[in-house]
Image (spheres, helix red, strand yellow):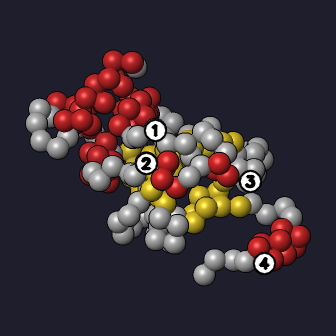
Amino acid sequence: TMATEDEIEKWCEQYHNANIGFAMGEASGLCAVDFDLETGDHLQIENFLKGYLPTTPLQKVGQKGWTKIYRNKKKISSTYFQKHDQRMIDFLADGKQTVVPPSIHPDSKKAYKWLGEDPVYVKIEDIPEIPEDFIEICKALSKDNFKEILNLKSGRHDLMVAYGIRAIKNF
């Protein structure tokens, strides 16, 4: 159940220093991609993801990395992907939330910032859907031989390959 305006106002008065977040998954019809890899192949993977993922008006930064928010009509479980024993990508869906501006990051003590539009002015239909093969792509990127995905010649990955090549060239 959604909170009423009165409940929200009461929470704001009672917990005036609390952070806020967007619910992900079935509750909101939204999901988020949180990218935090900072070592190794991070620039190649980040550039690839930026070319592969659709542009979304809802993007934010916190202590490191970035988060992009998408629509999601399917029931997909939240999961994460690692590279070299470091968390690389969190896919936030059912049962998860993402902290949003003007919340304060607990470690850096800096405010999260929107990179895109203020969500107050974003219509749900203006938020693109997460690509259907996103989880599959993340599994491939988390492997040591991730660069092999750029060599695929046919099938449903053609668009992804084209974006990947463009991103690598811009690297």
Closer to the camera, 125 or 156?
125
**In terms of sequence position, does the residue under pointer 2 or pointer 3 come before the other?**
3
Check disc 2: other Cα within 10 Å, few if <14, some if 14-19, many if 20+. some
- Look at label 4 and name its amino acid: Glu
- Residue 55: assigned label: 1
Residue drawn at x 43%, y 34% is 50
Measure how far apart labels 4 and 1 are at the Cα level: 34 Å
**In terms of sequence position, does the residue under pointer 2 or pointer 1 come before the other?**
1
- Look at label 1 and name its amino acid: Thr
- Residue 148: x, y in percent? 20, 34
Using the image, determine if residue 73 lies above or below residue 55.
below
- Residue 43: x, y in percent? 44, 29
**In terms of sequence position, does the residue under pointer 4 or pointer 1 come before the other?**
4
Residue drawn at x 38%, y 32% is 51
- Residue 151: assigned label: none
Check disc 3: other Cα within 10 Å, few if <14, some if 14-19, many if 20+. some
- Residue 7: assigned label: 4
- Look at label 3 and name its amino acid: Ser
- Residue 103: assigned label: 3
**In terms of sequence position, does the residue under pointer 4 or pointer 3 come before the other?**
4
Measure how far apart labels 2 and 1 are at the Cα level: 7 Å
Which residue lies under the disc numbered 2? 128
Q: What secondary structure is found at the residue carrying circle 1?
A: loop
- Residue 20: x, y in percent? 71, 61
For the question of whether residue 139 can be seen, the reply is: no
Closer to the camera, 51 or 151?
51
Q: Are dots 2 and 1 in contact, CB under 8 Å?
A: yes
Which tag is nearer the camera, tag 4 or tag 3? 4
Q: What secondary structure is found at the residue carrying circle 4?
A: helix
Q: What secondary structure is found at the residue carrying circle 2?
A: loop
